[in-house]
Amino acid sequence: MHQLEQLQRSFVVARKDVWIYYAKGPVMVFGLIFPLFLLMAFTIGRNMTVKDLFPGLMGMAIFFTSTAVGPAILPWEARSKTLERLVSSPVEVWALLLGDVFASFVFGLLISIIPLAIAILMGVDVLYLMVFGSGMILATFCFASLSILLSVYPPTDVPATVMMLSSLVRFPLVFISGVFIPVEEMPDWARTIASASPLTYFIDLARYSTTGISYYSIPTDLGVLTALALLFLVVSIKLHERFLPQRLS
């Protein structure tokens, strides 16, 4: 019963995050505007069909939108002095962080529906809708959990600092994840690096959903996304519990 109550409180935290942080400047820049220009740079001048571009486009859309909110929440809470009130309330740290994950998850899922709808209107045929839908949900939750992990250090109350440092992690992940070069066309050393990125597995699922071709097996893609989502969530909770006193001081 206690765990259920904490879970309910995490939804309350998520609703608070939705109302307060979705329209913040850094969230708009790193979640919408910057990815939009990156997508334009990715597509303009390339002699590729929309179907060929679809996996990479959806991968970048989901990755950037679902990691845009999470890194900024705790620094803003610390700066506005509301983090102390949250920590002193009957909400455990894991429930508080899970609420932030839910807020990031919803933001990523809702915004990513837009490029998906545009792609379908432009003639992209999703052959395996259940596979793609499952991958989209798992990947969004995985990336949302990663976004909370990215906000662990430094324990500062300056959102811009956390957002910039998190970008140092996000951008390399994009370039090693098969967005621009399919995994099977990479050299062996690059494939090894790509296998460490969660984005690689979603792009593989998106590619399979439209072409029927994948580098990894579908159970592998889904299983790795699930495992990494749980890993990011557990590690972020443990680390936040350790560094939270520093953020409050």
Image (spheres, grey):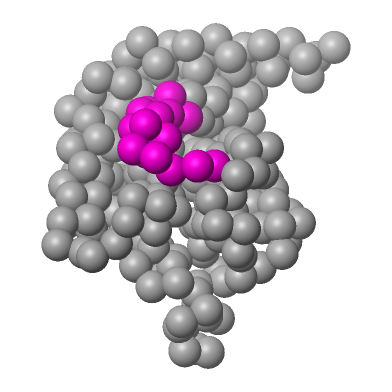
Q: Would residue 228 be visible to someone looking at this image?
A: no
* Residue ranking furthest to the bottom: 188
Q: Is residue 97 left or right of residue 70?
A: right
Q: Looking at the image, which is closer to me, 91 or 186? A: 186
> Residue 180, located in which quarter of the rendered image?
bottom left
Residue at left offset 47%, top offset 89%: 187
User: Where 19 sits versus 57, above or below?
Assistant: above
Residue at left offset 24%, top offset 50%: 39
User: Where 79 sits versus 188, above or below?
Assistant: above
Residue 120: in magenta span: yes
Q: Residue 13, how many percent across, how many down? A: 51, 15
Residue 43: in magenta span: no
Q: Is residue 74 left or right of residue 127?
A: left
Count how many numbered circles sit on residues in the image: 0
Q: Looking at the image, which is closer to me, 231 or 173? A: 173
Q: Would residue 195 be visible to someone looking at this image?
A: yes
Residue at left offset 54%, top offset 51%: 210
Magenta residues span 109-126
Q: Is residue 101 left or right of residue 92?
A: left
Residue at left offset 52%, top offset 79%: 184
User: Where 104 sits versus 172, above or below?
Assistant: above
What secondary structure is the stretch in magenta mostly built from? helix
User: Where 1 sits versus 197, above or below?
Assistant: above
Q: Residue 177, how many percent across, how many down? A: 44, 66
